Amino acid sequence: MATDTLVPAPENPFAIARRQFDIAADLLDLSPNLRCILRSPQRELTVNFPVKLDDGNTRMFTGYRVQHNLSRGPVKGGIRYHPSVTLDEIRALAMLMTWKCAVTNLPYGGAKGGVIVDPRQLSAEEIERLTRRYATEISILIGPEKDIPAPDVNTNPQIMAWIMDTISMHQGYTVPAIVTGKPLNIGGSEGRNEATARGIVYVLGEATRHLGIDLSRARVAIQGCGNVGANTARMLHDLGATVVAISDSQGGVYNPRGLRPIDLLQHKRHTGTVRGYPRGESITNEELIELDCDILVPAALSQVITAANATRVRARIVAEAANGPTTPEADEILYDQGTFVLPDILANAGGVTVSYFEWVQGLQEFFWTEREVNAQLERVISHAFQSVLRVAQEREVPMRTAAYVLAVKRVADAVTTRGIYP
C-alpha cells in the first residue's frame, strides 16, 4: 500500500481558511465591505513572558490569543501547547471556530490561543507556572462575557482549572464560567470529555441514514488515538461498527475482521503506542488514509488528505474529527469521486457545543445530568447536519461549502444588523 509520492509542503493554514471563506463569500455574493471584515481577525494578542524553571533558571515563552469575530456573542476557543504553534495557525483556528459556532447556531464568535512550547520537556510544576503566567498575560482579553477558553492540543481539565483559579484570584471571587472543559468538582459539565467524539458519532448517524448505509455494519478507519479518536472508536464499536484500523503518531494497526478498541487502548496504555498490537497488521498513517473502508475519520493532524493522495481515498464517508485534515485541492477531488465529506466545522462541533452547555450551567449554577447533556448535543448536531444538507442540496455544492455558506451568512447577517461603530 505504500507509495513513493512526494509529499508537498504544508500550506499556510490561514491562507487555506481564507480560501474556504472566499468560496462561500462568492456564492453569497457578499459585499466587499463584509468580506474585508470577515477575512481578518478582530483582535490579536502576542505575549512574551518569563517562567521560572525547576533548576532556578528563567526561560521566555511566546503565546497568542486571537479573537476572530464578536458579532454573535462572546468568543470561544481552545488553548494549545505545542512547539509548532504559529500566529497564522491560531488565526486560522479562530476563524474556523467562528464558522463552527455559527453552523451549530451557538451564540459565540471564534477565538483560539496557543503557547510555543513542548510540554513533554517541562515538569508538572513548570507547566502550572507557565499556565498561570500565560493566563495572567491574556487576562486583558478573556472573561465569561468576553472570551471563554477551553482545552485543545496538549491541554486538559487540570490546565483549565489552573486558568480558572488564576483569574479567580485576580478577581477576588470564584469565576467558574471563565473556562470550559474543567474538572467536574469545580463546575465542569457531565459528558464534556467525550463530547467531540459523541458529536462525530451523532453526525455519522445522520450521514449514514441519508446515504442508506447501515452504521452498525460499517467498516471504520480512524487516524489518531487521542481523546477524540479513542472515544470515537469505542462508541462506534459499541454501536456494532467494525473498526478495521486505528493509529497514533508512531503508526497504526489494521485488521479487516475488526479490532477490539478496549483491548487496543489497554495495549497503548501499557506500551505508549498502538504499534505492536498482536491482533493487527502494522501500517503507516499514510496507508491508513487509503484503506478500503466505509468511513474514514481523520482525528489527528491537519492536511493529511491532499491532492497527492485524495484519489486513493476509498472511504464512502470522510468525517473530519481533526481541524483542517483536507486541503482545498483534495476537497475537489473527493467531491468529484463521490466521497461524502463531513467538514470539520460540522463534524467536530460536539466539543464546543458541550462547552457552551458548561458555560450556561456555570453562569446559572444549575447543572445537568449526562443524559440531558447528550440529548441536547444530539439535538444540536442533528439540526446542524440537516441545515447543512439542505443548503448542499439546494445549491448543489459539497457539504463543506454548504457549511461555510450557512455559517458565513449567519455571521454576515449579524454584522449587518449590528452595523459598524461609530
Image (cartoon, helix red, strand yellow):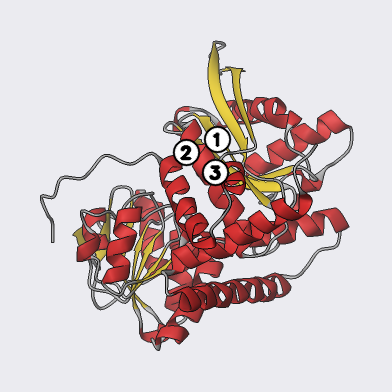
Label 3: which residue?
39
Residue at position x 54%, y 23% from top?
62
Question: Left of 107 or right of it: where is 98?
Answer: left
Label 2: which residue?
89
Label 1: which residue?
114
Coordinates of residue 276 in the picture (x, y in percent): 25, 56
Residue at position x 20%, y 45% from top?
7
Q: Amino acid at mark 1?
A: Gly
Residues tagged 3 and 2 counted as in contact (Cβ below 8 A): no
Q: Does the rendering let one see residue 352? A: no
Residue at position x 74%, y 39% from top?
164
Question: Left of 4 or right of it: where is 152?
Answer: right
Q: Quadrant of the N terminus?
A: bottom left
Name, please, the residue furthest toward the top: 57
- The crowd level at tag 3 (other Cα within 10 Å; few <14, some 14-19, many 20+) is some
Q: Does the rendering let one see residue 302? A: yes
Residue at position x 26%, y 54% from top?
285
In whole angstroms, how far apart are the C-alphas of marks 2 and 1?
9 Å
Q: Amino acid at mark 3?
A: Arg
Badge 2 marks a residue whose secondary structure is helix
246 vs 261, nearest the viewer: 246
Residues tagged 2 and 1 counted as in contact (Cβ below 8 A): yes
Name, please, the residue furthest toward the left: 4
Between circles 3 and 2, the one closer to the viewer is 3
Vertical relation: 191 (above or below) 184: below
Q: Quadrant of the C terminus?
A: top right
In whole angstroms, how far apart are the C-alphas of marks 3 and 2?
14 Å
